[in-house]
Amino acid sequence: MKNEKVFLFGKRAYRILGLGIVLIILGFVLMSGGGSNDPNVFNPAIFSPMRIRIAPTLVLAGFAVLVVAILATKKK
């Protein structure tokens, strides 16, 4: 019996998986912030296009890339 390590996915799939995780993290980082230390002061930065459109799109794209990584075939 050989003790060979058999990975579930290929090297290409793990790279795609890493890209998806980076996109998700970047999306959540871009969504953060925009608050105010004083509850009586309104900060309109919370409704910036970066937080409303771009960041959620990056998160969804990251999840789509993860699906592609899972479905990517393993090269022999």
Image: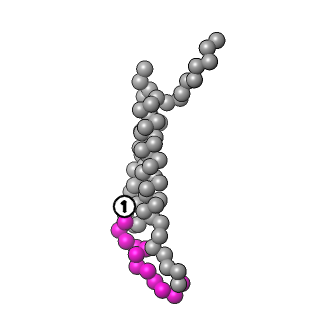
Q: Amino acid at mark 1?
A: Ile
In the displayed orientation, state which residue is furthest to the bottom: 40
Q: Residue at x 42, y 39 (%)?
A: 16
Q: Which colour assignment does the render follow?
A: one colour
Quarter of the image with the C terminus is: top left
| 63 versus 27 height, above or below | above
Can see residue 10?
A: yes
How many labels were placed on the picture?
Answer: 1
Q: Is residue 49 magenta?
A: yes
Q: Residue at x 44, y 80 (%)?
A: 43
Can see residue 60?
A: no
Q: What percent of the width, then of the height, locates residue 33? A: 47, 70
> In front: 4, or 73?
4
Q: Residue at x 41, y 32 (%)?
A: 12
Q: Which residue is under mark 1?
A: 54
Q: Is residue 18 magenta?
A: no
Q: What percent of the width, then of the height, locates residue 22? A: 44, 49
Q: What percent of the width, then of the height, locates residue 71? A: 44, 34
Secondary structure of the residue carrying numbered label 1: helix
| 59 versus 51 height, above or below | above
| 13 versus 36 height, above or below | above
In the displayed orientation, state which residue is furthest to the right: 1
In the displayed orientation, state which residue is furthest to the front: 3
Q: Residue at x 47, y 54 (%)?
A: 25
Residue numbers of the magenta segment: 39-50
Quarter of the image with the N terminus is: top right
